[in-house]
Structures are given as structure tokens and as C-alpha cells.
């Protein structure tokens, strides 16, 4: 038996001819995600693989035996579910939603610009079909996405993997063209995630006060309240502003950005709303400082505006150069997820009821985005008197879960 304790990611540094002529071993994903296993090569040679614990083997990697012989790893075709958008009614955002919900369930996903692959699961297949996606069982190699902090991914500067592993310190989002490429998709998913460390989960945006005063009391009233807030507050206000701010960041239009920043700070209708936009803006700016794709000039300019959440989020969204509608839909879905979680905690309602509310919001998001993109800059508005009054009352509410 040949023993292999070293691996070269994607055969880096080896000639194509050398890799092509090496003996191969065909491995499915279940085997390749293990760091220690036995296998048989295509010419019948038994091998024992002993890699650092946690190492994941990818198709195209090259194993190095103790006697120096090379073994090319090929990803074996296996049964997977292929998830695509509806050709008639679908949009790229449908894949973002699918990847988001699958990621929340910690499901291994292979991401591509046009489809997703997951391992067979009839429950997930039914969920995805209910989201109007096309789910097909196919035979194909399975290469799920590595974790953002994976020690064993194919990152820069990590081509030979042995017992000593170098951990990458940053995940780089590279500027891309406006087509829905994989990196672009991941950037939007990242920014839409409630796990983004900006503190959005700690604010209810008036919802807790609306519950206290009886305007919201069950699943139906909570859904109606959030749908109204999406259209009357977000679409006409912050989302409309971001529709102008994102291209302004891309075009380095500092005069427009200054004007938009002033509008944000002048239109927060309560001290609580102003506190939220300032705190979340500063937190997101701190997060951006740790990303390698943000210029020092943009960060410095943003810091002196002063930073508010809509302006800093616009900067973050502008970096991967997505289509404007996709960027706004990602932002709106992240907002919807946070507000739904607030409703679940405070009404209170169950998780299934929360998912039904989120489904209503997701259905309403495309129209809200279209409304926001259609508004000229001079028509952006912030006029929600009841929400402002409730936000002000929340500041002195006796019992509350959310920050004020």
C-alpha cells in the first residue's frame, strides 16, 4: 500500500503533462471530506491517505506518496440535486434566496453563477420547489463551497498542505463585472446575512412599541405591519437613497454622497432611529476596514461624512459591482430577516409563522426595489409619522427587549 501524507492544491507548480500522466483515484465527496481514508487508484494500486485532521481533498488536487509518486484526485460523479431558476419567471435573486436558506441550515452547497448543487434531501427539495425554483436530480461531481475561515481551502499562498497549515486571515471580495458571478453572489449573501456584525438584531425599528400599543398582535398583523414598513419607509427612503448612493460610490461622486449623507442624518425622525443608523454605520465601517478590497480613500471619506448605515452599506454593496436591483434586493432581504426575527421574539409567534411572514416579504421585495429605483433623488422621502411616534415612545417603554 502506498502511503500519502502530503497534498498539492490543484497540482500547483506541476506541469499539466505530469498531472495528466499521473495515476488517478476517483473519490466521491463523502470520502474527500475525510482526512484519513483508504482507496484504490485507477490502475488497481491500494493507497492510504493520512493528511492533517480537517483537510478536505478537492478534485484536481495531487496526493504525494512517501516514495514521491504522484496521484491525481478526480471528483467522482454522484447523485446531487441541481437547483436552477425558472427560465420564464425567475431572476438571479432566486438563487441568492435559496443559497441563504440552505446556508442557514448548514447545508453543503456548490455555488455557480447559474445553478446550485446540494446532496439529495427530499425535504429541502420540497422547500426549494415551494420557492418556485427548479430542482432536478443529476449525476455530477460535487464540490461544495469551503467555509469562509476554512484552513484547507484553495486560498492564495497555500499550495502545499502538510501537518503545518497557514490560516488565511481575510476573505477577499474582488471587484467583478455586473454579471451574477460566484464571487458577486457570495458578496451579496455575506452582506444580507443577519450574522453581519453590525448589531441589526438589537433594534426593532418601532415594532416592539407597535406591539405594546396593540397595533401588532399576531402573525397576520405583524406581516401587514412589516409589508407597509417595507413599502412606505424602506422603498421610499433608505432603499431609494441607496439606489443613488451605490452608483455614486462607484463613480467617486463625493458631492452627491455628501448630500445624501446629510439627508440621512436630517431625516431620522427620533433619537432612537438616529442612534441606530449611526451605530450600525460605524460598525459596518469597522468591518469594511478589515476587508482588503476597500480603498483607504473611500474609508476615510466615509468616516468623515459621518457614516450612516445606508451610506456605508451602499459602499459595501458597490465593491462587488452587482446589478443595482440585485444589490437592493439583497439589502431588503437582510432587513426583512432581521425584522421577522424581531417579530418572532416580541409578538411572540413561532418559527413557521415567521417563515410565512418572511415569504410574504420576499414576494413584496421586487416591487419595493422597482419603486426605489424609479424615484429621482429629489423625490426620496422619510415620512412615517406613526412609526416615528412609536420609536420615540419606545425610548421610555418600561419593558423592552430591543435597544433604544
Image: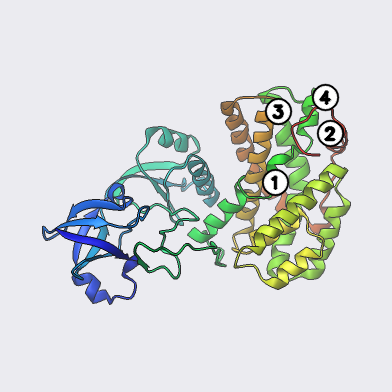
Instruction: Name the one closer to the observer, 19 or 328.
Output: 19
Considering the numbered disc 2 on the image, is that residue within a helix, a strand or a loop?
helix
Binning the other alpha carbons within 10 Å of mark 3 as few (below 14), some (14 to 19) or many (20 upward) gives some
The alpha-carbon separation of the residues under discs 3 and 4 comes to 13 Å
Name the residue tied to disc 2: 394
Instruction: Name the disc covering residue 213, or none.
Output: 4
Considering the numbered disc 3 on the image, is that residue within a helix, a strand or a loop?
helix
Mark closest to the chain's N terminus, 2 or 4: 4
**x, y percent for residue 19:** 24, 71
Is residue 79 rendered to the left or right of residue 174? Answer: left
Binning the other alpha carbons within 10 Å of mark 2 as few (below 14), some (14 to 19) or many (20 upward) gives many
Residue shown at 33% from the left, 76% from the top: 13
Q: Nearer the viewer, mark 1 or mark 3?
A: 1
Is the residue 58 above or below the residue 294 in the image?
Answer: above
The alpha-carbon separation of the residues under discs 1 and 3 comes to 17 Å
Name the residue tied to disc 3: 346
The alpha-carbon separation of the residues under discs 2 and 3 comes to 13 Å
Amino acid at each position: 500500500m502506498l502511503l500519502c501524507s502530503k497534498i498539492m492544491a490543484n497540482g500547483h507548480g506541476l506541469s499539466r503533462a505530469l498531472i495528466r500522466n499521473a495515476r488517478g483515484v476517483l473519490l466521491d465527496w463523502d470520502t474527500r471530506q475525510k482526512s484519513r481514508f483508504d482507496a484504490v487508484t485507477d490502475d488497481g494500486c491500494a493507497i492510504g491517505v493520512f493528511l492533517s485532521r480537517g483537510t478536505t481533498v478537492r478534485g484536481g488536487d495531487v496526493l504525494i506518496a512517501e516514495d514521491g509518486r504522484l496521484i491525481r484526485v478526480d471528483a467522482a460523479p454522484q447523485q446531487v440535486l441541481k437547483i436552477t431558476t425558472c427560465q420564464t419567471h425567475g431572476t438571479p435573486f432566486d438563487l441568492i434566496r435559496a443559497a441563504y436558506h440552505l446556508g442557514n441550515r448548514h447545508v453543503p452547497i456548490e455555488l455557480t453563477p447559474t445553478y446550485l448543487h446540494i446532496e439529495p434531501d427530499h425535504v429541502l427539495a420540497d422547500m426549494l420547489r415551494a420557492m418556485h425554483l427548479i430542482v432536478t436530480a443529476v449525476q455530477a461531481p460535487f464540490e461544495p463551497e469551503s467555509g469562509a475561515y476554512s484552513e484547507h481551502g484553495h486560498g492564495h499562498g497555500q499550495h502545499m498542505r502538510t501537518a503545518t497549515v497557514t490560516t488565511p486571515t481575510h476573505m477577499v471580495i474582488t471587484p467583478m463585472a455586473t454579471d451574477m458571478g460566484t464571487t458577486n453572489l457570495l458578496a451579496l449573501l455575506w452582506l444580507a446575512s443577519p450574522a453581519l456584525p453590525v448589531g441589526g438584531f438589537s433594534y426593532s425599528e418601532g415594532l416592539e412599541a407597535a406591539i405594546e400599543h396593540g397595533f401588532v398582535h399576531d402573525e397576520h398583523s405583524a406581516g401587514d405591519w412589516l409589508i407597509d414598513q417595507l413599502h412606505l419607509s424602506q422603498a421610499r427612503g433608505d432603499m431609494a437613497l441607496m439606489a443613488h448612493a451605490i452608483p455614486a460610490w462607484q463613480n467617486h461622486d463625493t458631492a452627491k454622497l455628501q448630500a445624501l449623507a446629510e439627508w440621512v442624518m436630517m431625516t431620522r425622525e427620533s433619537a432612537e432611529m438616529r442612534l441606530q443608523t449611526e451605530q450600525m454605520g460605524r460598525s459596518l465601517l469597522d468591518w469594511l476596514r478589515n476587508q482588503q478590497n476597500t480603498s483607504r480613500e473611500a474609508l476615510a471619506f466615509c468616516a468623515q461624512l459621518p457614516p450612516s448605515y445606508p451610506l456605508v452599506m451602499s459602499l459595501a454593496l458597490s465593491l462587488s459591482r452587482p446589478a443595482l436591483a440585485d444589490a437592493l434586493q439583497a439589502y431588503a432581504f437582510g432587513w426583512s430577516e432581521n425584522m421577522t426575527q424581531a417579530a418572532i421574539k416580541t409578538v411572540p409567534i413561532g418559527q413557521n409563522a415567521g417563515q410565512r411572514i418572511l415569504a410574504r416579504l420576499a414576494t413584496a421585495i421586487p416591487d419595493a426595489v422597482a419603486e426605489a429605483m424609479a424615484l429621482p433623488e429629489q423625490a426620496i422621502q422619510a415620512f412615517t409619522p406613526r412609526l416615528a411616534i412609536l420609536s420615540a415612545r419606545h425610548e421610555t417603554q418600561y419593558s423592552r427587549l430591543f435597544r433604544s
